[in-house]
Image (tube, rainbow, N blue to C red):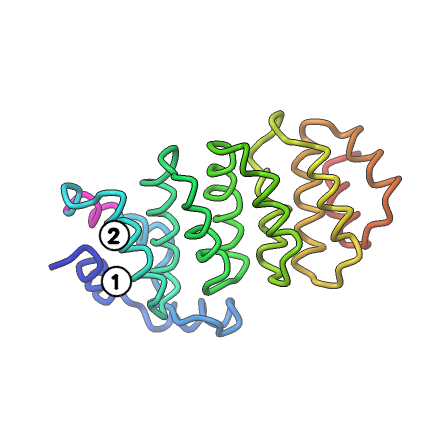
Amino acid sequence: MSFTTALISKFEEHANAEQARAMEAYMKDLFSFYGIKAPVRKTILKETINNFKSELSRDTIIEIVNTLYHDLHRELHYCAIELTDRFLKKNYEVDDIYFIEKLITTNSWWDTVDFIAKHILGTYLLQFPDQTTIVVTKFSSSKDMWLNRSAILFQLGYKEKTDTQLLFKLCDQHKSSEEFFIQKAIGWALREYSKVDSAAITSFVKKVSLKSLSEKEALKRIT
């Protein structure tokens, strides 16, 4: 039995139709669900990893992730990005950006994209800082809204390492967007950095004409 087969078998065993309906409704019926909540999902994934640990290499992880991402069930997409974060972290290769881009643009919705942007794309660009300008320029100018959002959010965990000039440039670039998820991303990214330098955020918001949602979200933590 393969890792993927074993994982799916466990999920089918723990499926809950009532919870699945509620989860699907919450996610606007964009995806199918087994109806397995996060703690149980994480436990099943951990146990499966332990059972197949000797077989899990960088190449097999990427193969597994691609297989899971082609399934219709959202829990398997979550497992895919969690596997990527666990096994490729600090072990990325430069060309992995194409793999990361595919994760962002496949089965795209805020729940996976936000995790990928912060934990996967953000970590990749810390490992390869010389790729930041190339990647962010491509993502921020893309017609794919989720790549735009990822470019705005990738520094969420950077704190003092945040490139504020880049952050402000991206927010300014997308400030007129009518997309809810872009307006929200701008506010979130600015709010997160306000924990480090609230004065810089206040000054930026005063100078730049943001959408009301972005401005409201940006200033939430500033009294």
Q: Residues within 10 Å of mark 1 (few under 14, many from 20)?
A: many
Quadrant that contains the N terminus: bottom left
Please tell me whether mark 1 sits on a helix, a strand or a loop. Answer: helix
**Residue linked to disc 1:** 11
* Residue at x 76% of width, y 50% of height: 173
> In the rendered structure, does residue 13 fall within the stretch colored magenta?
no
> Which callout, 2 or 1, points at the residue further toward the start of the chain?
1
* Residue at x 22% of width, y 43% of height: 57
Main SS type for the magenta part?
helix
Locate residue 143 relative to residue 28 in the image: left or right.
Answer: right
Marks 2 and 1, how far apart at CA: 8 Å
Locate residue 223 relative to residue 44 in the image: left or right.
Answer: right
Residue 157 position within the rendered picture, expressed as x and y whole percent measured from the top left: 55, 35
Please tell me whether mark 2 sits on a helix, a strand or a loop. Answer: helix
> In the rendered structure, does residue 47 fall within the stretch colored magenta?
yes
Locate residue 11 relative to residue 215 in the image: left or right.
Answer: left
**Dot 2 and dot 1 residues touching (CB under 8 Å):** yes
Q: Is residue 162 above or below residue 84?
A: above
Quadrant that contains the C terminus: top right
* Residue at x 32% of width, y 49% of height: 42
In magenta, the rendered stretch is: 46-51
Residue 25 position within the rendered picture, expressed as x and y whole percent measured from the top left: 49, 72
Locate residue 192 relative to residue 117 in the image: left or right.
Answer: right
**Residue linked to disc 2:** 44
Count the marks.
2
Q: Residue furthest top?
A: 160
Q: Residues within 10 Å of mark 2 (few under 14, many from 20)?
A: many
The quarter holding residue 53 reads: top left
What amino acid is labelled 1 in the image? Phe
Residue 144 position within the rendered picture, expressed as x and y whole percent measured from the top left: 60, 62
What amino acid is labelled 2 in the image? Ile
